[in-house]
Image (tube, helix red, strand yellow):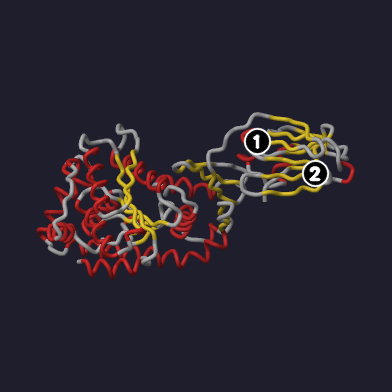
């Protein structure tokens, strides 16, 4: 097994790569760290134990992991996490665990976990239970980047039996988590009740499930490859926008897949079937409507012919401040920072900065910066008045950004909108 593991690891990474090993103290992660110590440079290894605080034995497990690492001269980090146990414990604990990984992992490290062949079968069945498509049924990959860091799973080709046999052969000690036998948890129900029956009937069943997951992964990759050219023609990932003007020309299936790919690349929680139908309805409504749909921590909105992924927008109350020559102001909620440089204004937004040239007659003049402009306003050097709604539309400012977009006035006359590109 050691030789097979070494070959696998060398395919996944380089000898100089720094690795953070997820260590629970169970047989799987103990075997993983032992194999890494025999394969990888120890100075490139760190281990992390996530203390969930759910078991009375958690402190003992933390001590075990600390000692296991000390015997091998490897740094071990004990990270305590807090989450709401009244909600779905499996999901809440997993979210807290990966948040802890994100907080701990260094920029030049990769996380390594001990997921194995039997875990892969469980993950496939859980995806099947949720009604997932190709993406979900692809289960776990050897390398993934979906959590904000690179994650390696070098044990996916090895079964639980392989790992236990290796641990006994090498006289390794490990801890047993009593919660693994609680079949109220979906994964444990599959592990304890369902998969043993299937494995008894079909000896190679986990390998066949893994093969099916690989087929799903390949089909998903092919689908993405075929749609990528189309997607990049209509998507702007810097602005997290998608132009849906051409969507009526596409089949419903193509529209749905383009939406899913766009959302995935924008790191948005995948929509349910019902939510996807709601998004599809966004495409057919009149362009002057501004629907929105919350997906996880993001909101998908439509403005004119485009969909946008946005964060929650803080409503800013109407605000006004004078801006003199060489003066710098920071607007409420840090929506923008504006500096008066005589012949132009320098405006710094959260992700970019722009310069706005002033009319000659306003050079060095004291100006007024407003937020939350509505109603009719008098235009600078013109006799007529204009609705702010029309000005917003002319400047292509989406409805949800209008309350926090700075507007320049001089002596109560509208001059310009300070907009981001």
Picture residue at 64% right of the left edge, 29% below the top: 317
* Residue found farthest to the left: 200
- Dot placed on the residue nearer the N-terminal end, 2 or 1: 2
Q: Nearer the viewer, residue 48 or 149?
A: 48
Q: Which mark is residue 341?
A: 2
Mark 1 element type: helix
In this image, 316 relative to 415: left or right? left
The residue where tag 1 is placed is 403
Percent coordinates x, y for residue 277 in the rendering: 44, 48
Q: Residues within 10 Å of mark 2 (few under 14, many from 20)?
A: some
Mark 2 element type: loop
CA gap, disc 2 to disc 1? 25 Å
Image-quadrant location for residue 138: bottom left
Q: Are marks 2 and 1 in contact (CB under 8 Å)?
A: no
Q: Nearer the viewer, residue 183 or 395?
A: 183
Picture residue at 74% right of the left edge, 45% below the top: 346
């Amino acid at each position: 097994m050691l030789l097979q593991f070494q070959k696998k690891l060398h395919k996944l990474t380089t000898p100089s790569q720094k690795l953070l090993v997820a260590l629970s103290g169970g047989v799987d992660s103990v075997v993983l760290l032992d194999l890494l110590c025999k394969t990888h440079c120890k100075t490139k290894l760190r281990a992390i134990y996530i203390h969930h605080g759910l078991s009375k034995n958690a402190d003992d497990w933390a001590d075990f992991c600390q000692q296991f690492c000390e015997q091998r001269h490897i740094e071990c980090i004990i990270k305590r996490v807090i989450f709401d146990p009244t909600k779905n414990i499996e999901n809440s604990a997993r979210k807290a665990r990966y948040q802890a990984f994100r907080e701990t992992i260094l920029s030049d490290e990769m996380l390594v976990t001990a997921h194995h062949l039997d875990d892969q079968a469980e993950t496939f069945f859980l995806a099947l239970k949720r009604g997932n498509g190709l993406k979900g049924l692809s289960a776990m990959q050897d390398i993934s980047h979906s959590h904000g860091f690179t994650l390696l799973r070098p044990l996916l080709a090895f079964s639980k039996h392989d790992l236990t046999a290796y641990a006994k052969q090498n006289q390794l000690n490990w801890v047993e988590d009593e919660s693994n036998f609680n079949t109220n948890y979906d994964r444990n129900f599959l592990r304890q009740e369902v998969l043993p029956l299937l494995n008894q009937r079909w000896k190679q069943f986990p390998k066949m499930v893994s093969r099916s997951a690989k087929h799903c992964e390949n089909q998903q990759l092919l689908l993405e490859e075929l749609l990528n050219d189309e997607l990049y023609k209509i998507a702007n990932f810097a602005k997290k926008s998608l132009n849906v003007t051409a969507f009526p020309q596409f089949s419903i299936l193509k529209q749905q897949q383009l939406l899913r790919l766009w959302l995935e690349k924008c790191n948005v929680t995948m929509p349910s079937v019902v939510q996807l139908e709601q998004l599809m309805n966004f495409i057919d409504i009149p362009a002057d409507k501004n629907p929105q749909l919350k997906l996880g921590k993001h909101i998908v909105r439509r403005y004119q012919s485009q969909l946008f992924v946005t964060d929650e927008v803080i409503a800013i109350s109407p605000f006004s401040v004078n801006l003199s020559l060489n003066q710098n102001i920071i607007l409420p909620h840090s929506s923008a920072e504006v500096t008066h440089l005589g012949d132009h204004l320098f405006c710094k937004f959260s992700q970019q900065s722009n310069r706005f040239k002033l009319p000659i007659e306003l050079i060095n003049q004291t100006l007024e910066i407003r937020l939350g402009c509505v109603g009719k306003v008098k235009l600078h050097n013109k006799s007529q008045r204009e609705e702010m709604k029309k000005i917003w539309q002319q400047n292509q400012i989406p409805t949800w950004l209008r309350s926090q977009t700075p507007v320049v006035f001089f002596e109560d006359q509208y001059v310009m909108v300070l907009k981001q590109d």
